[in-house]
Amino acid sequence: MMQSLSPLDGRYSQLVNNLEAYFSEPALNRFRSLVEIEWIICLCQKKVLKGLPFLSETRIKELRKIAYDFDFKAFQLIERTTGHDVKALEYYIRDRLLESDEPNAKLLLAVHFGCTSEDINNLAYTLAIRGAAEQVLLPSVNQLKSVLKELAQNWADVPLLAMTHGQPATPTTVGKELAVFAQRLENQISNLKFLEYAGKFNGSTGTFSAVTFAVPEVAWDEVARDFVTTFGLEYNSLTTQIDPRDSLSTLFDILNHCGRIMHNLSTDLWLYISRGIFSLEVNTDQVGSSTMPHKVNPIKFENAEGNFEMADALFSLLSNQLIQSRLQRDLSDSTILRNVGVAFGHWLVGVNMLVNGLAELNVNQMVTAEELSQHYEVLTEAIQTQLRVAGIQGEVTIDDPYALLKHFSRGKSITAESLRIFIEQLPLSLADRKKLLELTPSKYIGLAEKLVYDYFGSR
């Protein structure tokens, strides 16, 4: 494995091995063989072609076993001769049928009947991609959302100095900021869950020409619709030789959007760590720097960031390129489509790194408190807003409270004492001044804590 060209097959192989069942060469051809076998069963059971046998349940199980027990090495031997993988698969299935207890010459002719390679490929790839998205990627991002939810609730009341444009701003809480990412991910998870995948099965240029010519009395478009929908896919009736893959492009866009959210989370966590807001709890043997013993580097978040960038580049390519084809068909998409698993792999590594990194985080509440205590200027927003309320209610006459606070605070070092003196001189009621004098940056968090509990409490 360590001789592999790709780190997904080497360094990160343990993190992505669940994807092998969907994107390896054996997996792809297993999905292809499944489509081929189901098409044979469809032709027989619907009595589309006279002469084909009606299959017993036992015989159907035997046929499906050809796909489930797919022998990739035997297939490879055939492909070396044909130089065409889908044609090799046709011959492979014919060989398996000949080896069965009930060989049927007519059944051999039903293998790949009326099909072009893309009839098989588009369904096989879509089934593999849907399976990987639903069975591997979706659970992984759900796990990340659950971790964020738990941390958000644990730290919902921990005040945090916000930074807008890189400058001190109205305080928030650690939990509320993590909850923002949990909500963003939940929206994309919902999009993933309800995405409809499409497929086609209509011949070499999407016209059913061969089968309609040979057997004109059959409503082939309806047969194809029934066949495609048995896989839980939407039927695409108008295509060229290939399905336009619009539904797959939508999937790649959703995954890419989700990945950019997680990239944003990775960089934010990195910045919080650089400020000392978070510390990393790692085992005593872990090395942070090869030369600086004091360091514990946020490598999991940096690793996640890099993998999401790799996934971004690949998903963008897949989404943009796979929906295009010259006239009725060209082959430029084929090699690109084979790299879907690589995009999924980098995305999955990124999620795993984030989950593992979050498990190492601790909030340094002494640091957050000290940081807030050094930035009393963030309370000027509260003061000018209180002045506006007093003016609206007719209690004071100040034309521009914002300008007053700007003149007092901008470019100056504001301390608790200087702010106290300023507040005591304001023409406000005793009650309003008392309220402002009792306010500190760590108390100025608005509804941050409530927003966290309200959001997760309803889910």
Image: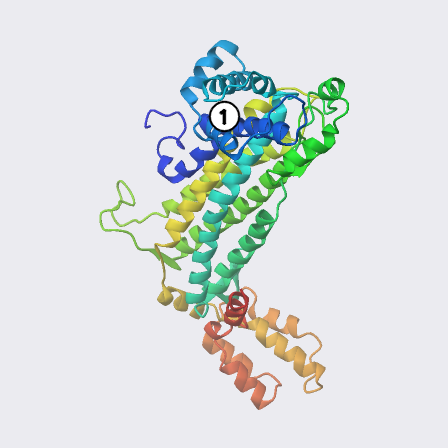
Name the residue: 50% across, 39% down. 132
- Residue 43 horizontal side relative to residue 415, left or right: right
Q: Is residue 212 above or below residue 288?
A: above
Residue 300 image offset from top left, x and y in percent = 38, 46
Way the structure is coloured:
rainbow
- Locate the N terminus and report the quarter of the image it occupies: top left
| Residue 86 in sight from this viewpoint | yes
Name the residue: 45% across, 22% down. 101
Judged from the image, the secondary structure of the residue bearing numbered disc 1 is helix
Q: Looking at this rendering, what residue extends furthest in the top direction?
A: 81
- In depth, the one of 320 and 239 nearer the eye is 239
Q: Is residue 422 above or below residue 97?
A: below
Name the residue: 48% across, 59% down. 178
Q: Residues within 10 Å of mark 1 (few under 14, many from 20)?
A: many
- In depth, the one of 262 and 402 nearer the eye is 262
Q: Is residue 246 above or below residue 114?
A: below
Q: Looking at this rendering, what residue extends furthest in the bottom direction?
A: 430
- Residue 12 horizontal side relative to residue 345, left or right: left
| Residue 327 in sight from this viewpoint | no
Residue 348 image offset from top left, x and y in percent = 45, 41
- Say which quarter of the image contains residue 361: bottom left
Q: How many marks?
A: 1
- In depth, the one of 427 and 389 nearer the eye is 389
- In depth, the one of 345 and 197 nearer the eye is 197
Which amino acid is tagged 1?
Asn
> Which residue position holds label 1?
29
Q: Looking at this rendering, what residue extends furthest in the left direction?
A: 285
Residue 65 image offset from top left, x and y in percent = 46, 30
Name the residue: 53% across, 30% down. 34
Residue 376 image offset from top left, x and y in percent = 49, 71
